[in-house]
Amino acid sequence: DMISMARPFLADPDIVNKAREGQPEEINTCIACNQACLDHAFVGKMSSCLVNPRACHETELVIEADSIPTDMKLNIAVVGSGPAGMAFATTAATIGHNVTLFDKSNEIGGQFNMAKRIPGKEEFYETLRYFDNQIKKLESAGKLQVRLRTEVKYDDMKDSSAKEWGQFDKWIVATGVDPRTPPIPGLDHPNVLSYIDVLRHKAKVGRRVAVIGAGGIGFDVAEYLLHHDDKTDHDITADEVNPQEFLSDWGVDGTNEKRGGLLDKVTIKNPHKEIVLMQRKKGKLGATLGKTSGWVHRATLVKSNAVEMIPGVKYEKVDEDGNLHITTSKGERRVIEVDNIILCAGQTPNNRLEEDAKGSGVEGKVYTIGGAYEAAELDAKRAIDMGTRLALKISDESVIPGKHTFKAPVGAEEKLIGFLNEFK
């Protein structure tokens, strides 16, 4: 009799009309991340949306089709089709710029193509579906070209004599991040993998696993390994999630026959791996996860009874057998016998194109965004917001490399909470 929705209207205020008109592919789907809505609300920031930075900023971020005057239209190259690149390309092309989107991969999406494989993040498929649909529409309208399987190098950018490369007024570098390799002896052992090996290249992982790094990626990898069945090697999409299994996993009685709607016993699936998750910092693992969603990730690992969490670790070495030697915060030396070690020790910006362009005639045309600009915690919220805001201002002469990042203005609630925090 009634359908109640809240967050989906932040992601797409026209969700009902699009559904009524039979256009589900047009809907910008809420991915239930809470990063820009509830997480903002609890610290006094203006609520918005990771996949739709215009939410609650509609009068500030105005995206109107073909609104750029003819004499301000630019030919723009976007290198990288991750969240930042997709957001910039679709926004810039919509308002009237001529955009060419390059990516060395055979598909758009960047790191979202790894994130969608994580249990609980199946909705990321929907974000990729939405951007893919928008890009195809803009391609059909002649506003945007997509060049997949094309790696752009600095020599291409500076070659103004080539018709293919010399036509661009601006270069937007959205090349993402590279995994950081910590200085631990023995990391060249074949048992050592990066999270990219596991999530993108689908490397096979043994039963016993050590995960180095307990930030967002470390937790994602641990959750993926617990639930992913190597035998079937099938990633579940949003449409394939079993609601009854979800309710059982969290002790909810879907029949409402039990008192309080809670099951007497929570069903725990047999985990596929035994995992040791570690971090160098002391204190609770996962402390930097989302304010309103971090507890879910921690609880999932804890209730599996298959994950040991160790803070305050000093990594000594990987020995010739591929086992990890550590020293705990209490000074205890341990040898963790494992089949594989997976590195989730942070990221560094892949800003090589920007660095190569410095001091050249191209330097003033290169604008770096997303993870290539700042790699901290692979923040898709910041990447999409940054790409959208720059696209709306890129034709302004005052927007030059180094002065090309823009943020939402600080609201009254955030100012008030900041003021009150001074008295804590």
Image (tube, helix red, strand yellow):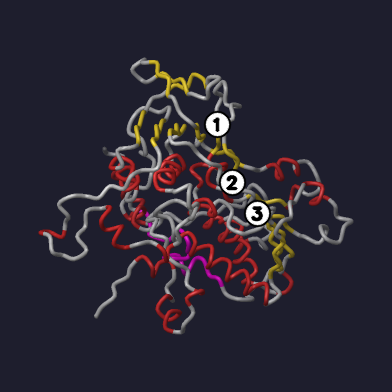
Q: Main secondary structure of the magenta part?
A: loop
Image quarter in which the N terminus is found: bottom left
Label whose residue precedes the other's in the sequence (2 or 3): 3
Residue depicted at 33% across the width and 37% down the height: 306
In the image, what residue type sits under mark 1?
A: Val
Q: Nearer the viewer, residue 282 or 334?
A: 334
The answer to whether mark 1 and mark 3 are in CB contact below 8 A is no
At mark 3, the secondary structure is loop
Picture disc at residue 192: 1
Label at residue 408: none
Q: Quadrant of residue 93?
A: bottom right
Q: To which quarter of the image does residue 258 belong?
A: bottom left
Instruction: Specify the amino acid type for callout 2.
Output: His
User: Which is closer to the viewer, label 1 or label 3?
Assistant: 1
Q: Which residue is mark 3?
A: 80
Residue located 49% across and 66% down the image: 60
Inter-mark Cα distance, 1 to 3? 28 Å
Relative to 57, does residue 295 appear above or below in the rendering? above
Other-residue count near label 3 (Cα within 10 Å), few / some / many at <14 / 14–19 / ≥20: many
Label 2 element class: loop
Q: Residue at x 81, y 51 (%)?
A: 156
Horizontal placement of 238 versus 146: left or right?
A: left
Query: At which x and y percent is residue 159?
Result: 85, 52
Name the spot of residue 345 as percent of width and height, x first.
50, 34
Q: Is residue 185 left or right of residue 302?
A: right
Nearest the camera: 124 or 396? 124
Q: Secondary structure at mark 1?
A: strand
Instruction: Identify residue for label 2.
Output: 201
Write the start and end of the magenta stretch as one range.
45-63
Q: Nearer the viewer, mark 2 or mark 3?
A: 2
Residue type at the position of mark 3: Gly
- Sequence-wise first label, 1 or 3: 3
